[in-house]
Image (cartoon, rainbow, N blue to C red):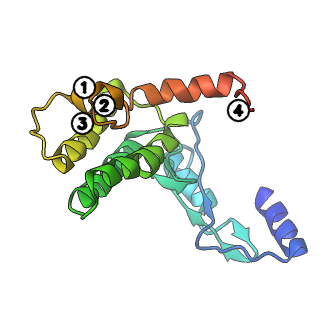
Amino acid sequence: MQANKLTLYSNWAGLIISGSKTKVTGSLNASPSKDQNGLTPSEALEHQLKNNILVQNQATNYITPSSPFFYLGVTLTMNLNWNHQHRHMDENLKQKPDALEGSYASPRQTLNILRTAIIPSLAYAFTVTPCSYLDMGKWDAMIGRVIKSKHNLWRSTLTAMIREDVDGFKLGAPYHLRGIPQALSSSTRNKPRRPF
């Protein structure tokens, strides 16, 4: 069993594993709707796994297949329901720009914070999270709202006016989020050029 291997390795290496942070889940997709005991696949799985998997004599936490869990900065579920991750990205993108809009950061500092912190934190999940153009348009509008507010522009100001191309008398705001997934996928296909 894999949990026993984890225990043996961690004991050998002198590592301490937190039982409260260790989670176990699964999925019984090819099972009948009810087994011989009258349990659904989800109930049968819970019966098999809950408090039965031990790591360093600590019971692991059982998570139902439809429950979201946070792993490496992304909210996942065993049934690949991405609505939880989209909701997490919405909340994250609402909270950070709202705090930035209410801060004393100058318009130029706001652009730099958006470019170097907020957009990369959102784009981090693009490699594993399927997002629609509608989602990206919504997030783009949230970022544009902050930029317009910090520059004392009307909300009805054309978004093209705040985009890059500082030489063309635009504000130099980060470009559309819609281009980020394509840039990420092309960067994984092409070898980066050396700067020297």
- The residue at which mark 2 appears reads as 163
Q: Between tags 1 and 4, which lies in front? A: 4
Q: Residue at x 29, y 27 (%)?
A: 134
Residue appearing at x 74%, y 30% in the figure: 194
Instruction: Give the number of the disc on residue 195.
Output: 4
The mark that comes first in sequence, 1 or 4, is 1
Three-letter amino acid code of the residue under disc 4:
Pro
Q: Nearer the viewer, mark 3 or mark 2?
A: 2
Nearest to N terminus: mark 2 or mark 4 = 2
Image quarter in which the N terminus is found? bottom right
* Mark 1 and mark 4: Cα distance apart in space: 31 Å
Q: CA distance from mark 2 to mark 1?
A: 5 Å
- The residue wearing badge 1 is 160
Label 4 Cα crowd, 10 Å radius (few <14 / some 14-19 / many 20+) = few
Mark 3 vs 2: CB contact within 8 A: no
Q: Secondary structure at mark 1?
A: helix
* Dot 1 and dot 4 residues touching (CB under 8 Å): no
- The one nearer the camera, 81 or 37, is 81
Q: Assign a secondary structure to mark 2.
A: loop
Could you tell me how far apart the alpha carbons at marks 3 and 2 are, in whole angstroms? 12 Å
Q: In the displayed structure, does residue 190 sit left or right of residue 137? A: right
Vertical arrangement, residue 10 with respect to residue 166, above or below: below
Residue underneath mark 3: 141
